[in-house]
Image: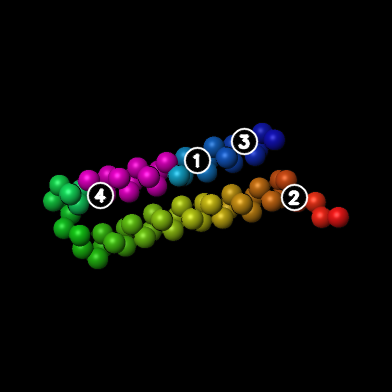
Amino acid sequence: ALLYEELKEDESNLDLLEYTLRKSHYERLTSGVDSGTVASAVFVDIISTFERIGDHSFNIARAMIDPVKVH
């Protein structure tokens, strides 16, 4: 149970990191620091992909810790 709680905390931290990075990136765009280049779009795609990988990893680990019982 302790491992699962740590895993949930890590997944929540990853969600928060993705939100924070996306927010600061959009602030840079609106302030004119970044001009909205292709690299800007790639950055958003990369952080979204990392967050999705974290979600999938969490779901796999959760299934290993607490497998669904089939009768």
Residue bearing mark 2: 67
Residue bearing mark 4: 26
The residue depicted at 45 percent of the width and 44 percent of the height is: 15
Nearest to N terminus: mark 4 or mark 1: 1
Nearest to N terminus: mark 1 or mark 2: 1
The chief SS type of the magenta part is helix
Residue bearing mark 1: 12
Q: Position of residue 6 (x, y in %)?
A: 59, 36
In three-dimensional space, the C-alpha distance between marks 4 and 2, rounded to whole angstroms, equals 40 Å
Residue bearing mark 3: 5
Nearest to N terminus: mark 3 or mark 1: 3
Q: Secondary structure at mark 4?
A: helix
Crowd band around label 2 with a 10 angstrom C-alpha radius: few (<14), some (14–19), many (20+): few
The residue depicted at 82 percent of the width and 55 percent of the height is: 70
Q: Is residue 19 above or below residue 1?
A: below
Choose top left, top right, bottom left or bottom right for residue 43: bottom left
Whether residue 33 sits left or right of residue 44 in the image: it is left
The residue depicted at 13 percent of the width and 51 percent of the height is: 32
Disc 4 residue type (three-letter)? Tyr
Disc 1 residue type (three-letter)? Ser
Please state the extent of the stretch shown in magenta in the rendering: 16-27
Disc 3 residue type (three-letter)? Glu
Disc 2 residue type (three-letter)? Pro
Which residue is most to the left? 32
24 falls in the magenta region: yes
Viewer-nearest of discs 3 and 4: 4
Q: Are marks 3 and 2 in contact (CB under 8 Å)?
A: no
Whether residue 7 sits left or right of residue 17 in the image: it is right
In three-dimensional space, the C-alpha distance between marks 3 and 4, rounded to whole angstroms, equals 32 Å
Q: Position of residue 36 (x, y in %)?
A: 20, 59
Q: Position of residue 51 (x, y in %)?
A: 46, 52
